[in-house]
Amino acid sequence: MNILILDTTTYSPAFAYYTNGECKLCRVTENERNADSILLQIKDGFSELGIAMKNIEAVSLSNGPGSYTGLRVGSAIAKGICFAGKAGLLLINTLDIIAESLADRGFELLTAVIPTNSKSSEFYYAEYKNEDGRMKRNSDYKMDISENINESGRIIVIDKAEKIDFIEGADVQYTDGNLKVKAQYRLTMDMIRDGKFAEISGSEPFYMKDFVPLKSKKNNLI
């Protein structure tokens, strides 16, 4: 099966193209929040290798939580490709991907986290347990400040591209775009095996938190 892996949720936007289990193309843009250029990167990468977009049979989207803009961009790209080429859509939770990216490190328990924004100590997170070499979620998806998340004493996993330091004393491990792509592919194959394709037109990003525009502190002039 020809599968496009797409992740625009964090500071390391990435995509990859797998054909029958072999990665033919993988590109990660580290330390870059702007996901708007990802579609052009996909187009250029496919063109360089002579791959036709119409050959994509499934699009696997890292569906959040994460950057509001990144989630909307990724959703629009994934839906467009699926509608145009009649590919199936698979939605993978971003926290699940982060946890799975370190599955081979031998950690028994860990907590995957994503900052809600760059100016807050609040994080999206979920807790995971290693079962036969795969990270299985054993909590709800939650939001809380870093001090409360660390009370569990578990290992914290965060994308190294996020420019946020966790609290002092936390056992923090870092993942990256390449590790996440491989993890997303493994989770994608699980969903394909189980037939868990999303309904394309009705699919939405997993925001977890409503977007609230910041109000200007300047006095209004009458």
Image: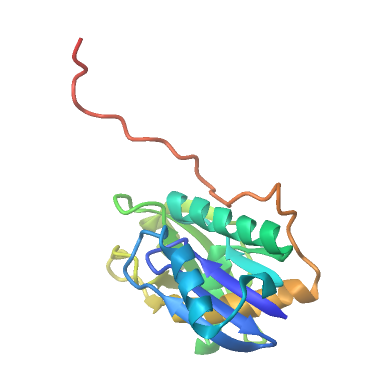
* Residue at x 44%, y 70% (from the top left corner): 41
- Is 164 on the left-hand or right-hand side of 5? left
* Residue at x 70%, y 47% (from the top left corner): 202
The mark tally for this picture is 0
For the view shown, which residue lies furthest in the top direction?
Answer: 222
* Residue at x 62%, y 71% (from the top left corner): 53
Work out whether residue 94 or residue 2 is closer to the camera in this orientation and state it.
2
Q: Is residue 87 visible?
A: yes
Residue 60 lies, in percent from the top left, at 63, 68
Work out whether residue 63 or residue 34 is closer to the camera in this orientation and state it.
34
* Residue at x 62%, y 56% (from the top left corner): 80
Which quadrant holds the N terminus?
bottom right
Which quadrant holds the C terminus?
top left
Residue 71 lies, in percent from the top left, at 50, 54
Q: Residue 151 sits in which quadrant?
A: bottom left
- Is 180 on the left-hand or right-hand side of 92? left
Work out whether residue 137 or residue 56 is closer to the camera in this orientation and state it.
56
Residue 28 lies, in percent from the top left, at 42, 76
- Is 128 placed above or below 218 here? below
